[in-house]
Amino acid sequence: MTRPSEVTRERIMKAAERLFAERGYDGTSIRAIVARAHVNQAAINYHFEGKDGLYREVLRAAFRGLTEDQLAHAGEAGAMSREEALAAFVRRQLRPLLARDEVSRHIRIFNWETVRPTPVFRKLLSEEAAPFMGVATDLVRRFLPDADYRTLVVAAIWLLGQCSIFVRNREQLAGPPVELALEETAIGWLAETISRWTIVGLGGTA
Amino acid sequence: MTRPSEVTRERIMKAAERLFAERGYDGTSIRAIVARAHVNQAAINYHFEGKDGLYREVLRAAFRGLTEDQLAHAGEAGAMSREEALAAFVRRQLRPLLARDEVSRHIRIFNWETVRPTPVFRKLLSEEAAPFMGVATDLVRRFLPDADYRTLVVAAIWLLGQCSIFVRNREQLAGPPVELALEETAIGWLAETISRWTIVGLGGTA
DNA sequence: TACTATTTCAAACGGCAGTTTGAAATAGGA
DNA sequence: TCCTATTTCAAACTGCCGTTTGAAATAGTA
């Protein structure tokens, strides 16, 4: 059975995740969270020991969700050609363009952190980002078997950058002067295009 | 002669630019700005009609500074090979890694805007980003002479993404688990590496 | 110098933020 | 059923926020 306190906790987490993703930490007030969660204002301090504690929990949950999502598909890569594996990776990275789902919200929370990382985030990153970077590094290693470690890391980041700029700036790119409308079919084409350029860049064959 | 009011205005602008770049709009208080600028608190409302007005001015100045910096070098590209021109562009995009100067601060102010753009920023972007995008588009057109417009735009954004991820996440990348230390010599190598992969990806010859 | 417009200043205002409080309600075990 | 620990609640507290105020200082002009 779910204890009543767990219900409240869960309601707060859900509301907070949405609001933090949309408006960031500073832009989200406790009063806004409790209004959305239909709980009393003091519940946040009772269950999370303050706004900071709540944010830490949301961040942790987001991180867990994201890495699980990527690591879940990491095993499949081995059965594919390096080109197929990279294309699949790119498609997965572009997923937030397609869906306004939980994963997209998690990425958005992380985007807030890239400008000015909170200590909580720094710690989380330093402790748990390794597996995710490992997936990306393994991917590019298949194209650069003789490269040293630093080159592999840079290649992995480079790969992430090509996708993240479209995800991060989706809203701006949709407006003038770019007018890049990314509806469902266009996203497939975009993933394919990015994959092709990247594969060729790393010495693969498109 | 510089009127005393101009001195105060300039001091406020300078302090505000630094603080907005470092902490964002919400994270910067008027009291922090005036303390740094050594002016009275009411001066901001007197000279800029409030915090919003000051931010608008800072944003405009940052935008002017950035586009001027890139457009100033756009003419030189014609005299280079397409490979040289792209490498120079990448080097210029990575410049904030090297220096903690005005240009870097301007980029940082823009980074805050990418997560949740303010109306002021949207307007500025829609009105004045075209020349900058034009530079990037012209650059990739030399590699993709037969591509349609949408492909060119995507290629230009793709190019920007490869650089911006290193600029935007410099601080995180320096720490664990990546440990990508970007001192001066490493930045030159990074620019060269990115350029090479990009050129090859677009069908050029490294 | 005398007058006017501009600019500076300290202080206070109203509002919203996160947090605390202590009582009321509820749940679970003896 | 009674007792205790947990959980909810409305209200108040403290502090920082952006803005306003009206007087004092300053600069420019005749």
Image: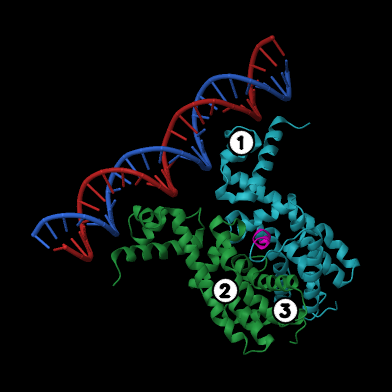
Chain colours: A green, B cyan, C red, D blue
Q: Is the residue B38 above or below the residue C24 in the image?
A: above
Judging by the rendered image, the residue that carries numbered circle 2 is: A97
Disc number at residue B35?
Answer: 1
**In terms of depth relative to the viewer, which is nearer, A52 or B51?**
A52
- Tell me where residue D10 appears, x and y as whole percent: 27, 49
Q: Which amino acid does label 2 sit on?
A: Leu
Q: Distance between the residues labelled 1 and 2?
A: 42 Å
Residues under numbered marks 1 and 2 in contact, where contact means CB atoms less than 8 Å apart? no
Crowding around mark 1 (Cα neighbors within 10 Å: few <14, some 14 to 19, many 20+) is some
Crowding around mark 3 (Cα neighbors within 10 Å: few <14, some 14 to 19, many 20+) is many
In what quadrant of the picture does the N terminus of chain A appear? bottom left
Judging by the rendered image, the residue that carries numbered circle 3 is: A198
Could you tell me if residue A186 is visible in this image?
no
Q: Are marks 2 and 3 on the same chain?
A: yes
Could you tell me if residue B181 is visible in this image?
yes
The span shown in magenta is B169-175
Subunit ID for the residue under disc 2: A
First-in-chain label (2 vs 3): 2
Mark 2, secondary structure of its residue: helix
Residues under numbered marks 1 and 3 in contact, where contact means CB atoms less than 8 Å apart? no
